[in-house]
């Protein structure tokens, strides 16, 4: 069962029905902890004020925005909560309009969420799902998710509705800011044709299942092999200790079985 990330209503035209959002992507990265090299115990990050030269407790922390170097405008949790309420209280995702998917450049795409409907919204869900699939269009909407407002599209994906959050246009950096782009040389017609020919020769259908995270797989194998070696060394150590104890016990038992020779009395020499 998928975890519910958000629940509310989905609205388009005069139709509205209850929905839930579920994360469509699972993070498979291997999480590594930072350990102390002396005792191999995890290190905890401490909040410290360099000005006061001491560690700071959580109840001493506030939010602030740096308007100029060293100057901050502080915001209380109450002020932030009140602002968020203006958006988060609305539990309805309104589809503003529909567009062709090809009109949206892939640089805008962020995260994906499956949309599910409960038993009371199945018919309306199907109407939107099949309508999007037949038209080939996607819905543009806004949603307040994880404490921030996000632009999103809603589209058909197989037998399911899918919500994909988008970056706002102002979040994208300008391509003109990329170093040396303006100084690139122009190509001749022959060079352009050669580039296209190479690309066409190396072209193939995209098969997602054919591509794997090789680094993650090798890191996992390395961790497993080191863990197995550590386990083997521990077993060997325990076996060595057990074997040593058995040998000591056998030595003690054998010494107890041997008859002790009577001690000879020292002969005193006559003066």
Image (cartoon, helix red, strand yellow):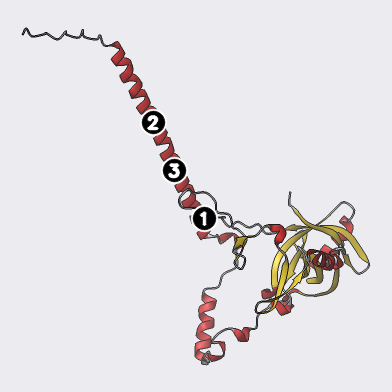
* The quarter of the displayed image where residue 102 is located: bottom right
The disc at residue 38 is none
How would you rate the neighbour count of disc 2 (Cα within 10 Å): few for under 14, some for 14-19, many for 20 or more?
A: few
Q: Is residue 199 visible?
A: yes
Considering every residue shown, the one lying at the far front of the view is: 271
Tell me what residue is drawn at x 88 percent, y 65 percent. Answer: 11
Q: How far is mark 2 from mark 3, CA to CA?
A: 16 Å
Reading the chain from its start, which is encountered first: label 2 or label 1?
A: 1
Relative vertical location of residue 233 with respect to residue 2 in this rendering, above or below: above
**SS label for mark 3:** helix
Q: Which mark is residue 230?
A: 3
- Label 2 sits on a secondary structure element that is helix
Tell me if mark 1 has few (under 14), some (14-19) or many (20+) residues whose alpha carbon lies within 10 angstroms of its own: few
Q: Position of residue 164 (x, y in %)?
A: 74, 66
In-image side of 40 versus 62 (left or right): left
When asked about the image quadrant of residue 47, the answer is bottom right
- Distance from the alpha carbon under mark 2 to that under mark 1: 36 Å
Asked whether the residues under the numbered discs 1 and 3 touch, taking CB atoms below 8 Å apart as contact, a structural biologist would say no
Q: Residue at x 54, y 77 (%)?
A: 200
Badge nearest the viewer, 2 or 3: 2
The secondary element bearing badge 1 is classed as helix
């Amino acid at each position: 069962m998928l975890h519910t990330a958000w629940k509310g209503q989905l609205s388009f035209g005069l139709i509205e029905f209850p929905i839930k959002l579920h994360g469509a992507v699972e993070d498979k990265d291997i999480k590594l902890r930072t350990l102390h090299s002396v005792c191999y115990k995890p290190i905890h990050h401490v909040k410290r004020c360099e000005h006061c030269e001491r560690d700071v407790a959580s109840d001493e922390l506030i939010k602030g925005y740096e308007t100029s170097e060293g100057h901050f405008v502080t915001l209380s949790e109450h002020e932030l909560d009140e602002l968020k309420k203006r958006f988060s209280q609305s539990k309805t995702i309104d589809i503003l309009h529909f567009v062709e998917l090809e009109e949206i450049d892939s640089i805008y795409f962020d995260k994906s969420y499956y949309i599910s409907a409960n038993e009371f919204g199945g018919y309306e869900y199907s109407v939107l799902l099949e309508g999007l699939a037949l038209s080939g269009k996607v819905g543009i909407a806004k949603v307040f998710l994880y404490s921030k407002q996000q632009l999103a599209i809603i589209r058909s994906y197989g037998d399911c509705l899918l919500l994909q959050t988008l970056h706002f246009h102002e979040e994208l950096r300008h391509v003109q800011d990329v170093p040396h782009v303006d100084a690139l040389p122009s190509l001749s017609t022959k060079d352009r044709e050669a580039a296209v020919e190479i690309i066409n020769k190396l072209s193939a259908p995209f098969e997602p299942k054919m591509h794997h995270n090789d680094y993650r797989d090798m890191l996992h194998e390395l961790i497993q092999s080191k863990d197995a070696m550590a386990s083997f060394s521990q077993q060997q150590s325990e076996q060595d200790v057990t074997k040593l104890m058995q040998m000591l016990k056998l030595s003690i038992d054998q010494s107890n079985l041997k008859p002790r020779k009577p001690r000879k009395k020292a002969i005193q020499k006559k003066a």
